[in-house]
Amino acid sequence: MANDIRSPSDFKRNTVELLDRLRKTGHPLVLTINGKAEVVVQDAGAYQTLLNLWLCSWLTRLWPWLDLRHSPARFALWWTSLWLL
């Protein structure tokens, strides 16, 4: 985790290396200004996975009130496929 917290100037100096690590690990990078977290940089694939998990979480909570013919997992797959087009 300590390696995932950087200053904007460090990110600017080591952009290629840090973006490479983001792609390989999927872990977000926190950029700080004056010691406070200000920006999170994340690989697009990891971000999409996070959104999909969030959607599935909400669907399982809302499913009892929705009148849909398919299972929550099938609906979630259909929904996420819309974003991939």
Image (tube, rainbow, N blue to C red):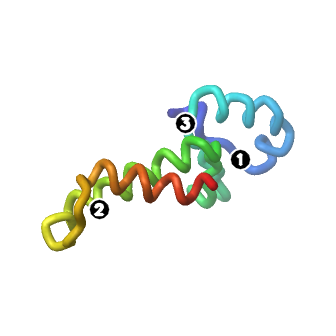
| Residue 34 drawn at (x, y percent) | 65, 58
Distance from disc 3 to disc 2, alpha carbons, whole Å, reads: 23 Å
Single out the mark in the foreground, 3 or 2.
2
**First-in-chain label (2 vs 1):** 1
Type of amino acid under label 3? His
Cα distance between the residues tagged 2 and 1:
34 Å
Tell me the kind of residue under disc 1.
Ser
Instruction: Look at 57% across and 34% down and name the residue there.
Output: 26
Q: Residue at x 49, y 45 (%)?
A: 49
The residue under label 2 is which amino acid type? Trp
Numbered mark located on residue 7 in the image: 1
Q: Between residues 85 and 15, which one lies in front from this camera angle?
A: 85
Q: Which mark is residue 58?
A: 2
Graded by Cα atoms within 10 Å as few (under 14), some (14 to 19) or many (20 or more), the crowding at tag 3 reads some
Sooner in the amino-acid sequence: mark 3 or mark 2: 3
- Residue picked out by circle 3: 27
Crowd tier of the residue under label 2, counting other residues whose Cα lies within 10 Å: few below 14, some 14–19, many 20 or above: few
Look at 13% across and 66% down and name the residue there: 64
Q: Residue furthest left?
A: 64
User: Which of pointers 3 and 1 indicates the residue nearer the eye?
Assistant: 3
Q: Which mark is residue 39?
A: none
Q: Quadrant of the C terminus?
A: bottom right
Query: Along the polypeptide, which appears first: circle 3 or circle 1?
Result: 1
Q: CA distance from mark 3 to mark 1?
A: 16 Å
Which sits in the foreground, 17 or 36? 17
Decide if residue 3 is on the left or right side of residue 55: right
Residue 51 position in % (x across, y down): 46, 54
